Amino acid sequence: MTEQRGFDAIFVGGGVIGLSAAWQAARGGARVAVLDRAEPPAGATRVAAGMLAPVGELAFGEPELLEMTLASAALYPQFVAALEAASGESTGYTYQGALHIALDRDEAAELRRVHDLQRSLGLAAEWLPPRRCRELEPGLTPSFNGGVHAPGEAAVDPRALTRALLAALAEAGAEVRSATEVVAGIFAGERLAGVRTAAGEELRAESTVLAMGAWSGRAEWLPEHARPAVRPVKGQIVELRSRDGEPPCERIIASERVYLVPRPDGRLIVGATSEEQGFDTAVTAGGVHELLREAYRLLPDVAEMELVDSLAGLRPGTPDNLPLIGPGAIEGLVLATGHYRNGILLAPLTADAIAAVLAGEQLPEALAPAHPARLSFVTQRVTKDRGALGDPGPEPGAAEASDRASELAARGAALAEAAEAAERAGRARDED
Ligand SMILES: Cc1cc2nc3c(=O)[nH]c(=O)nc-3n(C[C@H](O)[C@H](O)[C@H](O)COP(=O)(O)OP(=O)(O)OC[C@H]3O[C@@H](n4cnc5c(N)ncnc54)[C@H](O)[C@@H]3O)c2cc1C
């Protein structure tokens, strides 16, 4: 039987992004529904380590991403406080800092280069000799070449965060449905007016938010030109548990190849591989072997821990590693996807942005580079629609998109310059 329901916004996908954005919109008074084909926590959110680590995630050539991750990390304390108050559930948020370890001379040279970049950008990160690192984390391997302490890094438990979001959404009167797959769009002319589920139910809304994570590029319920350029990037993790209930380290510990995230309940998350394997979510012997070997090289005590679980998930990757947040290629469609390796961290900022877009406002400044107009599918649409309609005039929004692209290029240039200067300084020192 077909039922017709009306909402301000329907969120397709109940991962951390769909749930956070829906909660933010619901808090602002919007009538929202979240539909997920599985039972949240699912998707990448169920597998994620939950690091909130803008300093550790810093990479050369990604200045806009740094601006976003810093802005979202700054929102986290108030986001979890409000969420925990609204839901009565803990999110497992811990503000414990991180220690990045160089296990040999080559890794030390690389880590120093990254540290130069961190310092040039004014980030809180200090180079420490091995003795000082061991004072912070006595369980570290006896032999290594130093490390970078980033005291501001934090972590959250993504499954606990999901439970809190589900409770807060229920409290706010939102409708969240699991086992509800979206299979078709409902169109009013060119405009997306809602969705049809696999059970044949029709739900109508002013806006439909695509928050399907790695599956967003495969949203067959959208016309092909409106499907964003999102691809799956596989990641495997291993979950260990200490047998005395105490995690073997206090803070996040990372090397070039692995990171270890302690949970307050004594678990340790060891992550993560990064593999371009399409939609494959098999946990492999090779993946687990690599994670455990590298974890042991950092923290030998992991050998005594209980192996609790191993999981694989799909990060939603984009061509430029930036998320896609804002109006989609057809009217009525909003994108909240492509968060790649930082979706947990970027959830509060994304939630604010989506709530703003749904209320007809601009994206927050830090998220301007995430505007979907930067990628070619909008340009393709402009060309395609003009051709079809025989209309040579400017497409509404096209000039704005192009202005925004120039503005973003200019804003990115300053940070990119700082990154290059730091890289040059590192090279010069290595050559000396
Ligand atoms: C191993 C690993 C470690 C990670 N570690 C971190 C970390 O430490 N910190 C961090 O910030 N990020 C981390 N990430 C990245 C983070 O997990 C993702 O960026 C984030 O979870 C993306 O959230 P999402 O809501 O967009 O997608 P997802 O969590 O994948 O959710 C998408 C949802 O859409 C649903 N769906 C799909 N198709 C349909 C349909 N047709 N109808 C209805 N529902 C549908 C799925 O069931 C799923 O629940 C990690 C990722 C992996 C894989």
Image (cartoon, rainbow, N blue to C red):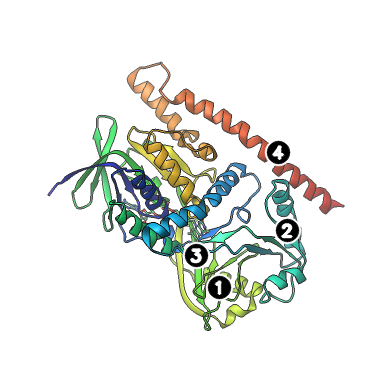
* Marks 3 & 4, CB-CB < 8 Å contact: no
**Distance between mark 3 and mark 4 Cα atoms:** 34 Å
- Which quarter of the figure has residue 366? top right
Which amino acid is tagged 1?
His
Mark found first going from the N terminus, 3 or 2: 2
- Which quarter of the figure has residue 416? top right
Query: Mark 3 vs ligand 1: CB under 8 Å?
Result: yes
Vertical placement of residue 158 versus 138, above or below: above
Which amino acid is tagged 2?
Glu
Q: Position of residue 105 (x, y in %)?
A: 77, 64
* Marks 2 & 1, CB-CB < 8 Å contact: no
Vertical placement of residue 316 versus 135, above or below: above
Which amino acid is tagged 3?
Gln
Residue 236 marker:
3
The residue that disc 4 covers is 417
Mark found first going from the N terminus, 1 or 3: 3
Residue 126 marker:
2
